[in-house]
């Protein structure tokens, strides 16, 4: 029997690097998505918003005539663990108050990029790979 793994992602997530602009009270921050789904995104940017902060994000989707503007909330961040590295902080955001049409547009755009190499593995996929590796080792060692 396969182990039960809680997969919390509701929408498929693809590795895409699309430009974003984050609008906060202090001004605008330029960034780029590292991956994206109709429910949220992982964004790399300088001086990211604080944890749980809600802000407006503009996403420039290739081949779309207009940019999408949605409300987002920071659900995780690496900004508090960054040191003197060159790497910019990364935040995970959940889309809030997004119109159904805009969610559909993101889903459609993401679907174009969901080849095997570009899909972000889910916890279930990681668990299946780990289980397959253990089973292979057991067979090889005749356990």
Image (spheres, grey):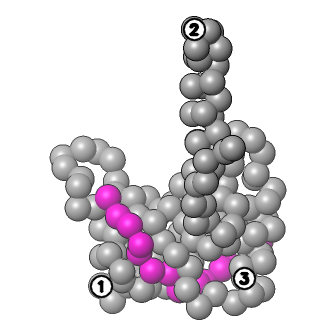
Q: Which residues are magenta?
A: 64-78
Quadrant of the image occupied by residue 9: bottom right
Of marks 3 and 1, the one in the foreground: 3
Residue placed under numbered mark 1 in the picture: 26
Residue placed under numbered mark 3 in the picture: 102
Q: Quadrant of the N terminus?
A: top right
Residue at image position (23%, 55%) is 81
Q: Earlier in the sequence, mark 2 or mark 3?
A: 3
Tag 1 near tag 2, CB within 8 Å: no
Could you tell me residue 35's position as x and y percent? Answer: 58, 57
The answer to whether one can see residue 43 in this image is: yes
Q: CA distance from mark 1 to mark 2?
A: 60 Å
Q: Secondary structure at mark 3?
A: helix
Q: Secondary structure at mark 2?
A: loop
| Left or right side of 142 for 52 | left
Residue placed under numbered mark 2 in the picture: 141
């Amino acid at each position: 029997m396969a182990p039960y793994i809680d997969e919390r992602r509701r929408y498929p997530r693809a590795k895409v690097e699309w430009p974003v602009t984050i609008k906060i009270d202090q001004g605008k921050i330029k960034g780029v998505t590292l991956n994206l789904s109709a429910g949220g995104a992982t964004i790399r940017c300088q001086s990211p918003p604080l944890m749980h902060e809600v802000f407006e994000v503009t996403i420039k989707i290739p081949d779309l005539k207009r940019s999408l503007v949605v409300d987002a909330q920071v659900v995780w961040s690496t900004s508090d663990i960054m040191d003197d590295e060159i790497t910019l902080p990364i935040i995970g955001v959940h889309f809030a108050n997004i119109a159904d049409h805009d969610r559909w547009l993101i889903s459609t755009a993401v679907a174009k990029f969901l080849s095997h190499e570009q899909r972000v593995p889910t916890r279930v996929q990681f668990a299946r790979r780990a289980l397959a590796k253990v089973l292979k080792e057991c067979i090889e060692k005749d356990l």
